[in-house]
Amino acid sequence: MTVETQTQGQSETAAPVAPAIELIGVSKSFGPVQANKDIDMIVAKGAIHGIVGENGAGKSTLMSILYGFYKADAGEIKIDGVTTEITDSHAAIAAGIGMVHQHFMLVQPFTVLENVIMGAEDGPLLRPSLAKARKVLAELAAEYELDVDPDAIVGDLSVGFQQRVEILKALYREADILILDEPTGVLTPAEADHLFRILENLKEQGKTIVLITHKLREIMAVTDTVSVMRRGEMTATVKTAETSASELADLMVGRHVVLEVDKSDAEPGEVILEVKNLCVTDFQGVKKLKDVSLKLRAGEILGVAGVAGNGQSDLLNILGGIDAAESGEVILKGESIDLTHKASAAMRRERGIGHVPEDRHALGLVMPFQTWENAVFGYHNNPEFSGKYGLANQKAMMEDTKRKIEKYDIRPTNPHLQASNYSGGNQQKIVIAREIVNNPDVLLVGQPTRGVDIGAIEFIHKQIVALRDEGKAVLLVSVELEEILALSDRIIVMFDGVIQGERMPKETNEQELGMLMAGIDPEASA
Amino acid sequence: MNKGLPKWADIILIPLLSLMLAFLVSGLVVMFIGKDPIEAVKVMVSGALGKFGIGYTLYYTTNFIFTGLAVAVAFHARMFNIGGEGQAGIGGVGVAVVLLSVDWPHWTIAIVAASVGAMVFGAAWAAIPAYLQAKRGSHIVITTIMFNWIGSALIVYLLVGPMQAPGMVPETMGFSAGSSIPTLNDMFPAFDKHAPANVTLFLALFAAVGVWVLIWKTRLGYEIRAFGHSEKAAVYAGISPLKIIMVAMLVSGALAGMMAVNTVQGEAERLILDTVQGAGFVGIAVALMGRSHPVGVVLAAFLFGILYQGGGELSFEMGIPREMIVVIQALVIMFVGSLENMVRIPVERLFVRFSKGAA
């Protein structure tokens, strides 16, 4: 590795500079679950160090230990060669560690300045702190391409800018080590590229960066070194230049995985679902869908790309019977469906619309419910599950659940396990199994592989393609462009409640879709 | 919750430990006022479980089972029904209306009719706050508390107005002899003759079984639990929030109302003022302690029955002021209800260590 730590003018491998972070034998368990097992890790000073691993591999736990949210059961943490006891986030900040969380820790109605000084005020009066912060922010902006209007209300900023505020917060607290947890999950490709430029700048100024992600492409693009975690253990640390995405994927899963989706060409049939001029306004008066029209054919997967929050969720929720539409029409198999408040998700299921929701924790599953209860959720009034006198036919539910567990390889196989005790992938398999087994004509799928490990992604993609091959229609909403490109037979891009464009997957690429996602029509501007 | 704790530890061990802590602190308080805590325990236990006392203990237990179940059912739909007090009071009006309007030939018919009256009136009193919650988002805690006051004012009005018996006393006429239900003494001579516990106890136990079936065996109960855990998920599954809020609160109100069969029909045999005497609020503690499970509710109701009856004996026998009893009850509620994690977390740690040692 040839990491240039320019500020020191030394090379990591040549001279014995103490590493920025050294973890020795760090372990942490939650009850019987061992989240981190005897982790050793060295992050060189002035490097961008990636940590990859499937969901539940223990990445976030490890970083939470480093940031003082959790206390390790055993092990030692050295910062710049000095053993450091990190009891809470104050201690972490004092040790020069800053963290940019996956879910931003910002006060939405406050200005950028107010957010930046929060918790780091110099005295009881705000004015001097704000003035100081304004000066520091101007310097940081110049130094690292981190321009943000200090007086803007954070809630009005796009997610990309909010993330910059988080980075500024850490730098304002004089962080030398910056931990970023899944930083690109909410960004457009262009925003992500900008973030990586910022990270490169930070690195050039001698900062150390730890990047946690499950996106191998990003790891390959920006990191110097990468550590792979699997099931709570650090399984490998390699130089990025000497590895490949597919090797990392295999290391993460522990076996060989196929990253490409293997599917034949679609044979679209007749139009099964037609959406005409759909409009909806949310309770704050923001128009979320503006005259959205689309056609979905039998035997095709229609991918809906877009940055989260551009109307895809609203589209899914209206079609799924959760929300009412303001105006417009939806025709399913020649008959229009009820879009008013009187409609319910149960009616949609009766009409043959299945729904794998974007947020399986909040919607798709009842987390304290056992598998057999979740496996029939929404279909519990089906005749096969109905006993006499309003009783539930629990025996039938149980048998049905056992079949789903078997067929969809849900692990552990215990039908009495609470949903919260499954990994993300297996939770999603429960939802997918439930919706597919009920044989829908149209399946609405939102973020099918969000927070799902690579092994399960492969499986879930296969199931979606198999459903299409049976001649069913699939409406796939995903913020992962790779997933949209790999699965879809046709792609539409949503931006600000409007369908910004339609492309065929073979005739487009991430760049073009990324521009459409940002509201720019490359054909119109060309 | 449920981090590898066996079910028995969750349901029995933790409440028991909390209870012991509560009694320990109570003992200290008794010591501070210069009385002998060991003696106090003896008086309390013999006072509550002796031949004379048990008839009272079971009478209170019956009340607490009904109000505890009422709170528990609403809890499953994540509704905090604080209106048990008012619903039980208005349930009493239902009992009185039914029993005064017909000269019932036999108690078996009378108790069924009175139960229907109690349930309908209790449910009706819960229906308005429930509807306001479901349709307008008015918080059920606020509205049910308000309805407690409205209910108690309404009863006062009825007992000094339309329903008042001739004379100056704020009460209705006595119910006819045909509606008098058997006491436990009538059925089992082992019970003391004056003890008010009556056949309603069996209705309460039956109701506990009914609630168990409703919550865990029916599709409606499944929907109630789903809604209680996550309203968003319930809507995704096509479950109507309006329906669940209404049904859960109606069942809850009906159960609270049923308490009046015990007090109004069984004990007073006419409608008088203040028949509920705080049992509606005790129901909240009972449901908390019983973890909203019918078995737990029955056990907790019995415990609170002992505390009520034994507490009365304590002031009578040892001159410990009645307020002291309220302190002890409050300690029990505090340790079992709100300080549960104080016991739970160390117990969980112990179990984890133990299971690791075994593995």
Image (cartoon, coloured by chain):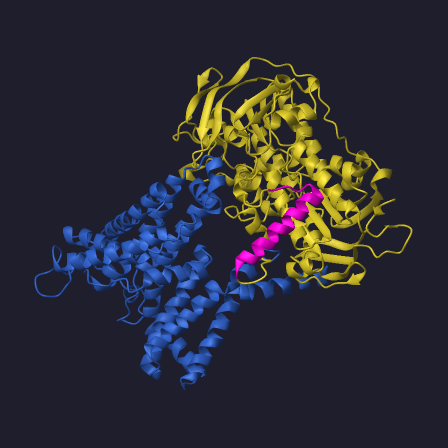
Question: In the image as oriented, which residue stretches furthest toward the left?
Answer: B166
- Asked whether the viewer can see residue A229, the reply is no
Question: In the image as oriented, which residue stretches furthest toward the right?
Answer: A14
Please identify the quarter of the rendering in which residue A225 is found: top right
- Asked whether A135 or A358 is in front, the reply is A135
Q: Residue at x 55, y 31 (%)?
A: A310
- Asked whether A146 or A312 is in front, the reply is A146
Asked whether A133 falls inside the magenta stretch, the response is yes
- Asked whether A78 or B278 is in front, the reply is A78
Lateral position of residue B171 relative to residue A489, left or right: left
- Asked whether A137 or A323 is in front, the reply is A137
- Asked whether the viewer can see residue A48, the reply is yes
Lateral position of residue A251 relative to residue A387, left or right: right
Please identify the quarter of the rendering in which residue B10 is found: bottom right
Which quarter of the figure is the N terminus of chain A placed in? top right
Place of residue A185 in the rendered image (x, y in percent of width and height, measured from the top left): 65, 38
Q: Residue at x 47, y 72 (%)?
A: B22
Place of residue A389 in the rendered image (x, y in percent of width and height, measured from the top left): 40, 39
Place of residue A303 in the rendered image (x, y in percent of width and height, measured from the top left): 61, 24
Palette colour of chain A = yellow
Q: Residue at x 45, y 41 (%)?
A: B223
Write the start and end of the magenta stretch as one range: A125-148
Palette colour of chain B = blue
